[in-house]
Image (cartoon, rainbow, N blue to C red):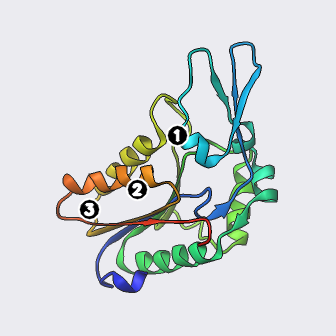
């Protein structure tokens, strides 16, 4: 898909992680005030879940670097797409970003080594970055958090911004940015289960 972007344009390429770059097994536990289990949410269910009074999230599986590296399976077609975007962005001064609803991992080095084992350029912080939105205010929906982060990147000045995500709400919020950033071309790609 990089071929559809004019090769000399400065591009911001954003990729979600869970169910976009990797099939993941991590689940979020929803607990009540007494730490009793209310329900268990997968990545998709979490994106739309609203905490009820007295409930809290338990992200222990989502923060566990070992669990992530042992259970996550790459989605090769999207990994390949990310690598193509990265090569283009490195050549023309753009940026490639993994933007995830996860917070900090228990062991950053295990996490980064796992991504490196799949050919992701995690050590090139000039042209590649991993942005975690999971630490902070849990009352803000994931789609809104991602939109806020992307808008901060847009302030740098990009001609084109692309966003690959498996969640339609995240992409809808992203496309709303085009109403404000009228000189930037916006491209969204919904990653489906079979991609």
Tell me which corner region of the image, top left, top right, bottom left or bottom right, holds residue 72: bottom right
How far apart marks 2 and 3 lie (CA) works out to: 20 Å
Query: Disc 1 versus disc 2: distance between alpha carbons?
Result: 14 Å
Q: Secondary structure at mark 2?
A: helix
Residue 193 place in picture, x, y as percent: 61, 65
* Mark 3 element type: loop
Relative horizontal placement of residue 44, taking residue 63 as reference (left or right): left
Q: CA distance from mark 1 to mark 3?
A: 31 Å
Whether residue 102 appears in this view of the structure is no
* Residue found at x 77% / y 20%: 36
Question: On the picture, is 136 further left or further right than 37?
Answer: left
Residue at point 45%, 55% (across, down): 168
Residue on which the image places disc 1: 48
Q: Residues within 10 Å of mark 2 (few under 14, many from 20)?
A: many
Indicate which disc, 1 or 3, sits on the residue closer to the N terminus. Answer: 1
Q: Which residue is mark 3?
A: 157
Mark 2 = which residue? Answer: 171
Percent position of residue 38, x then y: 71, 25
Which callout, 1 or 3, points to the residue nearer the camera? 1
């Amino acid at each position: 898909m990089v071929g559809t972007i004019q090769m000399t344009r400065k591009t911001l390429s954003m990729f979600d992680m869970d169910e976009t770059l990797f099939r993941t097994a991590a689940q979020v536990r929803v607990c009540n005030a007494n730490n009793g289990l209310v329900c268990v949410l997968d990545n998709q269910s979490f994106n739309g879940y609203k905490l009820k009074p007295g409930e809290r999230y338990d992200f222990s599986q989502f923060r566990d670097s070992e669990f992530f590296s042992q259970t996550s399976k790459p989605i090769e077609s999207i990994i390949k797409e990310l690598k193509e975007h990265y090569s283009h962005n490195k050549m023309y001064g753009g940026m490639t970003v993994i933007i995830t609803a996860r917070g900090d991992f228990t062991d950053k080095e295990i996490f980064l080594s796992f991504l490196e084992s799949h050919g992701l350029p995690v050590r090139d912080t000039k042209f590649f970055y991993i942005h975690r939105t999971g630490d902070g205010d849990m009352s803000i929906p994931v789609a809104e958090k991602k939109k806020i982060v992307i808008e901060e990147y847009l302030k740098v000045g990009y001609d084109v911004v692309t966003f690959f995500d498996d969640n339609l709400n995240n992409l809808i919020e992203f496309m709303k940015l085009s109403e404000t950033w009228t000189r930037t071309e916006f491209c969204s790609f919904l990653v489906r289960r079979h991609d």
